[in-house]
Image: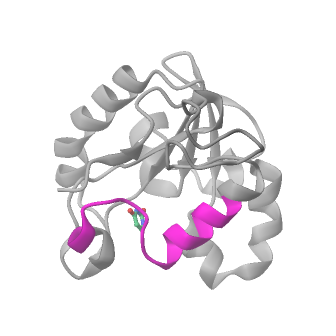
Amino acid sequence: TVFGVGHPQAHWMIVGEAPGEEEDRRGEPFVGRSGQLLDNMLRAIGLSRHAGASTGSAESSDPPDPAKQVFIANTLKCRPPGNRNPLPEELARCEGFLIRQIELVQPRIILAMGRFAVQSLLRSTAPIGQLRGRVHRYQGVPLVVTYHPAYLLRNRPEKARAWDDL
Ligand code: URA
Protein backbone atom coordinates (compact mmCIF):
# COMPACT_ATOMS: atom_id res chain seq x y z
CA THR A 1 0.00 0.00 0.00
CA VAL A 2 1.12 3.54 -0.81
CA PHE A 3 -0.80 5.99 1.36
CA GLY A 4 0.75 9.40 1.11
CA VAL A 5 3.67 11.70 1.78
CA GLY A 6 4.16 15.22 3.05
CA HIS A 7 3.47 17.54 5.93
CA PRO A 8 0.46 16.31 7.94
CA GLN A 9 -0.95 19.86 8.07
CA ALA A 10 0.11 20.95 4.58
CA HIS A 11 -2.04 23.70 3.13
CA TRP A 12 -1.92 22.00 -0.26
CA MET A 13 -3.22 18.52 -0.93
CA ILE A 14 -2.47 16.89 -4.24
CA VAL A 15 -4.45 13.87 -5.34
CA GLY A 16 -3.27 11.60 -8.14
CA GLU A 17 -4.45 8.29 -9.51
CA ALA A 18 -2.64 5.19 -8.26
CA PRO A 19 0.88 4.07 -7.46
CA GLY A 20 2.95 2.86 -10.41
CA GLU A 21 5.74 0.31 -10.35
CA GLU A 22 8.35 2.58 -8.75
CA GLU A 23 5.87 3.92 -6.18
CA ASP A 24 4.83 0.36 -5.35
CA ARG A 25 8.48 -0.58 -4.76
CA ARG A 26 9.30 2.47 -2.64
CA GLY A 27 6.02 2.96 -0.79
CA GLU A 28 5.84 6.65 -1.72
CA PRO A 29 3.53 8.35 -4.22
CA PHE A 30 4.90 10.06 -7.30
CA VAL A 31 8.53 8.99 -7.24
CA GLY A 32 8.77 7.90 -10.89
CA ARG A 33 8.93 10.12 -13.98
CA SER A 34 5.54 11.73 -13.30
CA GLY A 35 6.69 12.47 -9.79
CA GLN A 36 9.85 14.18 -10.98
CA LEU A 37 7.79 16.44 -13.20
CA LEU A 38 5.36 17.12 -10.35
CA ASP A 39 8.20 17.94 -7.92
CA ASN A 40 9.81 20.30 -10.45
CA MET A 41 6.53 22.12 -11.04
CA LEU A 42 5.87 22.40 -7.31
CA ARG A 43 9.39 23.65 -6.66
CA ALA A 44 8.90 26.37 -9.27
CA ILE A 45 6.00 27.78 -7.24
CA GLY A 46 7.82 27.42 -3.92
CA LEU A 47 6.18 24.22 -2.70
CA SER A 48 7.68 20.97 -1.48
CA ARG A 49 6.66 17.53 -0.25
CA HIS A 50 9.70 17.40 2.02
CA ALA A 51 9.20 19.07 5.38
CA GLY A 52 12.32 21.08 6.05
CA ALA A 53 13.28 21.43 2.38
CA SER A 54 14.44 25.00 2.02
CA THR A 55 12.41 26.98 -0.50
CA GLY A 56 13.71 30.36 0.60
CA SER A 57 16.36 31.86 2.81
CA ALA A 58 15.10 30.24 6.02
CA GLU A 59 17.51 28.02 7.94
CA SER A 60 16.86 24.35 7.39
CA SER A 61 16.39 23.92 11.15
CA ASP A 62 13.33 26.23 11.08
CA PRO A 63 10.05 24.33 11.41
CA PRO A 64 8.52 23.79 7.97
CA ASP A 65 5.89 26.33 6.99
CA PRO A 66 2.68 24.37 6.22
CA ALA A 67 1.75 27.06 3.67
CA LYS A 68 4.71 25.91 1.53
CA GLN A 69 4.14 22.22 2.01
CA VAL A 70 2.10 19.70 0.06
CA PHE A 71 0.61 16.41 1.10
CA ILE A 72 0.45 14.00 -1.83
CA ALA A 73 -1.99 11.11 -1.94
CA ASN A 74 -3.50 8.90 -4.58
CA THR A 75 -7.10 7.95 -5.22
CA LEU A 76 -6.05 4.30 -5.17
CA LYS A 77 -3.69 3.07 -2.48
CA CYS A 78 -2.53 -0.02 -4.38
CA ARG A 79 -1.08 -0.46 -7.84
CA PRO A 80 -3.50 -1.85 -10.40
CA PRO A 81 -1.78 -4.84 -12.04
CA GLY A 82 0.06 -3.88 -15.20
CA ASN A 83 -0.86 -0.22 -14.67
CA ARG A 84 -4.35 -0.78 -16.00
CA ASN A 85 -7.07 1.74 -15.20
CA PRO A 86 -8.65 1.36 -11.76
CA LEU A 87 -11.92 -0.58 -11.64
CA PRO A 88 -15.02 1.05 -10.13
CA GLU A 89 -14.99 -1.35 -7.17
CA GLU A 90 -11.31 -0.57 -6.51
CA LEU A 91 -12.09 3.15 -6.49
CA ALA A 92 -14.99 2.52 -4.12
CA ARG A 93 -12.83 0.47 -1.74
CA CYS A 94 -10.12 3.13 -1.52
CA GLU A 95 -12.40 6.13 -1.31
CA GLY A 96 -12.81 6.03 2.48
CA PHE A 97 -9.03 6.28 2.97
CA LEU A 98 -8.78 9.37 0.78
CA ILE A 99 -11.75 11.02 2.49
CA ARG A 100 -10.15 10.39 5.90
CA GLN A 101 -6.78 11.72 4.70
CA ILE A 102 -8.45 14.96 3.62
CA GLU A 103 -10.26 15.19 6.98
CA LEU A 104 -6.99 14.77 8.87
CA VAL A 105 -4.77 17.07 6.79
CA GLN A 106 -7.48 19.74 6.45
CA PRO A 107 -5.89 21.31 3.38
CA ARG A 108 -6.68 24.86 2.28
CA ILE A 109 -6.69 23.78 -1.35
CA ILE A 110 -6.92 20.50 -3.21
CA LEU A 111 -5.35 19.91 -6.61
CA ALA A 112 -7.03 16.96 -8.32
CA MET A 113 -4.85 15.55 -11.07
CA GLY A 114 -6.44 13.40 -13.71
CA ARG A 115 -9.81 11.86 -14.25
CA PHE A 116 -9.85 9.27 -11.46
CA ALA A 117 -9.09 11.84 -8.75
CA VAL A 118 -11.82 14.04 -10.20
CA GLN A 119 -14.24 11.14 -10.45
CA SER A 120 -13.77 10.28 -6.77
CA LEU A 121 -13.75 13.81 -5.35
CA LEU A 122 -16.23 15.64 -7.60
CA ARG A 123 -18.35 12.67 -8.67
CA SER A 124 -17.94 13.89 -12.21
CA THR A 125 -17.10 12.01 -15.36
CA ALA A 126 -16.69 15.21 -17.39
CA PRO A 127 -13.36 15.53 -19.20
CA ILE A 128 -10.55 17.41 -17.41
CA GLY A 129 -10.58 20.02 -20.18
CA GLN A 130 -14.14 20.95 -19.20
CA LEU A 131 -13.54 21.07 -15.45
CA ARG A 132 -10.27 22.95 -15.23
CA GLY A 133 -10.12 26.74 -15.22
CA ARG A 134 -12.52 27.29 -12.31
CA VAL A 135 -12.62 26.59 -8.62
CA HIS A 136 -14.76 23.66 -7.45
CA ARG A 137 -15.46 22.70 -3.85
CA TYR A 138 -14.88 19.46 -1.99
CA GLN A 139 -16.61 19.59 1.44
CA GLY A 140 -16.10 23.35 1.33
CA VAL A 141 -12.41 23.13 0.39
CA PRO A 142 -11.49 24.86 -2.89
CA LEU A 143 -10.56 22.23 -5.46
CA VAL A 144 -8.76 22.86 -8.73
CA VAL A 145 -8.70 20.29 -11.52
CA THR A 146 -5.63 19.82 -13.67
CA TYR A 147 -3.99 17.35 -16.00
CA HIS A 148 -2.17 14.35 -14.60
CA PRO A 149 1.64 14.67 -14.93
CA ALA A 150 1.80 11.36 -16.85
CA TYR A 151 -0.50 12.95 -19.43
CA LEU A 152 1.73 16.02 -19.55
CA LEU A 153 4.74 13.81 -20.26
CA ARG A 154 2.91 12.45 -23.31
CA ASN A 155 1.40 15.79 -24.37
CA ARG A 156 4.06 18.43 -23.79
CA PRO A 157 2.05 21.36 -25.26
CA GLU A 158 -0.57 20.90 -22.51
CA LYS A 159 2.04 21.89 -19.93
CA ALA A 160 1.22 25.56 -20.49
CA ARG A 161 -2.35 24.85 -19.37
CA ALA A 162 -1.10 23.00 -16.30
CA TRP A 163 0.98 26.05 -15.39
CA ASP A 164 -2.15 28.21 -15.69
CA ASP A 165 -3.91 25.82 -13.31
CA LEU A 166 -1.09 26.03 -10.77
N1 URA B 1 0.80 8.38 -10.95
C1 URA B 1 -0.07 8.61 -9.94
O1 URA B 1 -1.21 8.99 -10.16
N2 URA B 1 0.34 8.42 -8.71
C2 URA B 1 1.57 8.04 -8.40
O2 URA B 1 1.88 7.90 -7.21
C3 URA B 1 2.46 7.80 -9.45
C4 URA B 1 2.06 7.98 -10.73
Taking the image in four quarters, ligand 1 sits in the one at bottom left
Report the span colored magenta: 24-41
Question: Residue 95 location, x and y as percent?
Answer: 26, 38
Q: Is residue 11 magenta?
A: no
Q: Residue at x 56, y 33 (%)?
A: 64
Q: The N terminus appears in which quarter of the rendering?
A: bottom left
Percent position of residue 30, x then y? 43, 64
Q: Residue, x 51% and y 49% (percent of image)?
A: 49
> Residue 120, relative to residue 87: is it above or below?
above
Quick check: is 40 in the magenta stretch?
yes
Compared with 159, 9 (above or below) is: above
| Horizontal and vertical percent position of residue 79 | 23, 67
Q: Nearer the viewer, residue 162 or 2?
A: 2
- The answer to whether 143 is drawn above or below residue 43 in the figure is above
Q: Quadrant of residue 103?
A: top left
In this view, the residue in front, 124 or 51, is 51
